[in-house]
Image: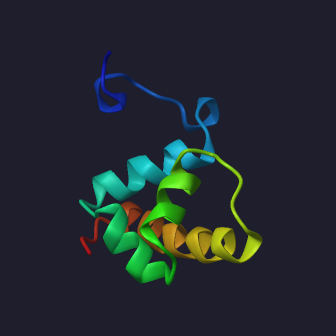
C-alpha cells in the first residue's frame, strides 16, 4: 500500500483526521508530543486522527493544537 505522502492529495478529498496526521508528520511530531501540547492523552490523538468519536473537550483541544501546527507548517516554522 502506497504511503499518503507518495501521492498527490487534495485536502478536499481527505478527512480532518488524515489532514491532522499529515500536518503532525510534516512537523515531525509524535502523537505523544501532540497529546502533551493539547493536554489530552496519546490515545485521544490516535482516535482523533482516525476520525473516531471523541469527547467535545478533547476535540476542541486537539483542533486548537493542530491549528497551531498547521499555521507553523504554512509559515515554514519548525516546532
Residue at 29% over, 61% down:
27
Q: Is residue 30 above or below residue 47?
A: below
**Residue at 32% over, 73% down:** 33
* Residue for point 40% across, 24% down: 8
Residue most extreme to the right: 56
Q: Position of residue 10 (x, y in %)?
A: 53, 31
Q: Is residue 38 above or below residue 3?
A: below
Which residue is found at the position 52% from the left and 50% from the top? Answer: 49
Left or right of residue 54, residue 75 in this image: left
Closer to the camera, 62 or 27? Answer: 62
Q: Is residue 78 left or right of residue 15?
A: left
Figure quadrant of the C terminus: bottom left
> Residue 58 at x, y = what percent?
64, 73
Asked if 4 appears above or below 64 in the picture, the reply is above
Quadrant assignment, res 74 = bottom left
Left or right of residue 66: residue 4: left
Give the answer, above or below, for where 12 lies relative to 60. above
x and y percentages locating residue 17 in the rendered image: 56, 48
Specify the quadrant of the image occupied by residue 54.
bottom right
Residue 61 in the image: state x and y as whole percent. Answer: 61, 77
- Looking at the rendering, in which quadrant would you find the N terminus? top left
Amino acid at each position: 500500500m502506497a504511503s499518503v505522502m507518495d501521492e498527490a492529495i487534495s485536502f478536499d478529498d481527505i478527512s480532518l483526521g488524515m489532514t491532522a496526521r499529515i500536518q503532525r508528520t510534516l512537523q515531525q511530531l509524535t502523537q505523544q508530543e501532540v497529546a502533551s501540547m493539547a493536554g489530552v492523552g496519546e490515545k485521544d490523538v490516535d482516535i482523533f486522527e482516525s476520525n473516531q468519536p471523541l469527547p467535545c473537550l478533547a476535540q476542541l483541544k486537539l483542533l486548537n493544537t493542530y491549528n497551531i501546527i498547521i499555521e507553523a507548517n504554512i509559515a515554514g516554522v519548525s516546532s
